[in-house]
Image: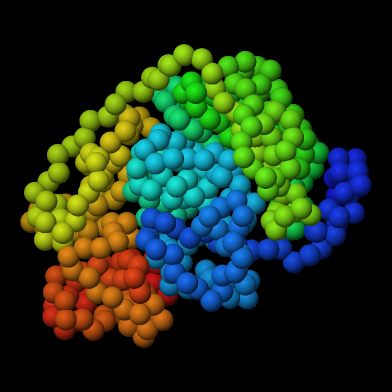
Amino acid sequence: MLPEVFLARMKTQLGDEYEDFLKSLERPRAVALRFNPLKGPRPSLPFTGEGVPWEPNGFYYDPESRPGLHVYHEAGVYYLQEASAMAPVSLLDPQPGERICDLCAAPGGKTTQIAGRMRGEGFLLCNEIHPGRAKILSRNIERMAVGNALVTGEHPANLAKRFRGFFDRVLVDAPCSGEGMFRKEEAAVTDWSQETVQMCARRQGEILYSAAQMVRPGGRLVYSTCTFAPEEDEGVVAEFLAAHPEFEPEKVEAPWFAPGENGSYRMWPHKLLGEGHFAAVLRKTGEEEADAEPSKGDGLPKQWLSFAEEMGIQLPEGKAVQFGSSLFWAPADMPEIARLKVLRPGLELGTVKKDRFEPAHALALWLTDCGNLQRYDADSAEMKAYLHGDVVPSQRRGWCLVCAGGYSIGWGKGDGTVLKNHYPKGLRR
């Protein structure tokens, strides 16, 4: 049962469309996934159907197929993401080579969507203040083969101090009362109250205040929620614009969504195949004011250089960062990260030992090719054994990139007869 206060407000808000809205909530919800261009060409899968109109890599799928259990999901070939949730990044329109920030990024759907559009070029900061959710975000960054991302667990106000006027585009997918998820999540209904709506609106305004400082003049800020509440949507945007005259609404090409005031768009469940969502597109005016200290890279150790030469691995432009016991390859544009709560400063290459290099799982997922490959069919007995953590037959010797079909999924180490399994124990099944 939906809250009576909510229903009364929606009846006023929607008028003649109210009954259509209620009927849409009774229909089975559409489910979708988004293919990852960082993993290479898109595979043909029997369970995908019609494309999501606003996301070229998005497709609806048969919910009975359970694609989360497929080996390609583990390989980062696709991400299960609700279709309307793909809309804010479509409106953000990230480009390769830009500096982009996803300020409220967990669990990583929109961040990995941004990364796919960046094609590995530029600098992506993805942040999540809650430690548990930040760890999930970091794991999804790894699974989806994102190599140009800095993952942080900071308060937005701290990031605003460090990255003033630094980003070309900033996405604020703000924590909200979750009304658009009522059909999807029962907890969203039971946790809802008008007090929650008011509390969320105050918090959203604070986050937007920090985000505004991080956008460069001429840059784009997209604010989004998964709620219908005007207090959290149009109300927050109107208050923000009144307090920030350096921002102005920006109209973009978005024929799939219902346009509103101040550069806003709504995704209504009775008008498209998806849940409820809201987004507003804003442009910053004024003079250039970028203020972020550049970081210095470390030298690449000889153990890595030897391993990379042997495996035929070439890294993109960037810089080495020693982070704990692990070696990372950071984007060239990454600024100074000292005194920030960092979970992942770029692509994890592996661990430097005294006389050798141990490659990281993240590196295996990021690679699309290397000098020593072992391919197994995605549905083969060998691949099932590999995912289970067993040794698998192979004539390869030394470190070997294991692929499910045409997609990298992990490491093995061969002796000419079998591969010793290096698939992470926490992922085995």
161 or 172, which lies in front? 172
Q: Residue at x 38, y 55 (%)?
A: 38
Q: Tell me if residue 397 can be seen.
A: yes
Q: Is residue 27 above or below residue 56?
A: below
Q: Tell me if residue 150 can be seen.
A: no
- Residue 213: x %, y % from top left: 51, 22
52 or 122, which lies in front? 52
State the quadrant of the N terminus.
bottom right
- Residue 344: x %, y % from top left: 36, 45
Q: Residue at x 70, y 28 (%)?
A: 262
Q: Residue at x 30, y 48 (%)?
A: 347
- Residue 111: x %, y % from top left: 48, 46
Protein image colouring: rainbow
Q: Quadrant of residue 43?
A: bottom left
Q: Quadrant of residue 309?
A: bottom left
Q: Is residue 100 above or below residue 426?
A: above
Q: Residue at x 15, y 55 (%)?
A: 308
Horizontally, residue 45 falls left or right of residue 200, namely left
Horizontally, residue 13 falls left or right of residue 337, namely right
154 or 255, which lies in front? 255
- Residue 310: x %, y % from top left: 11, 61
Horizontally, residue 272 falls left or right of residue 58, namely right
Q: How many marks?
A: 0
State the quadrant of the C terminus.
bottom left
Q: Is residue 409 above or below residue 324?
A: below
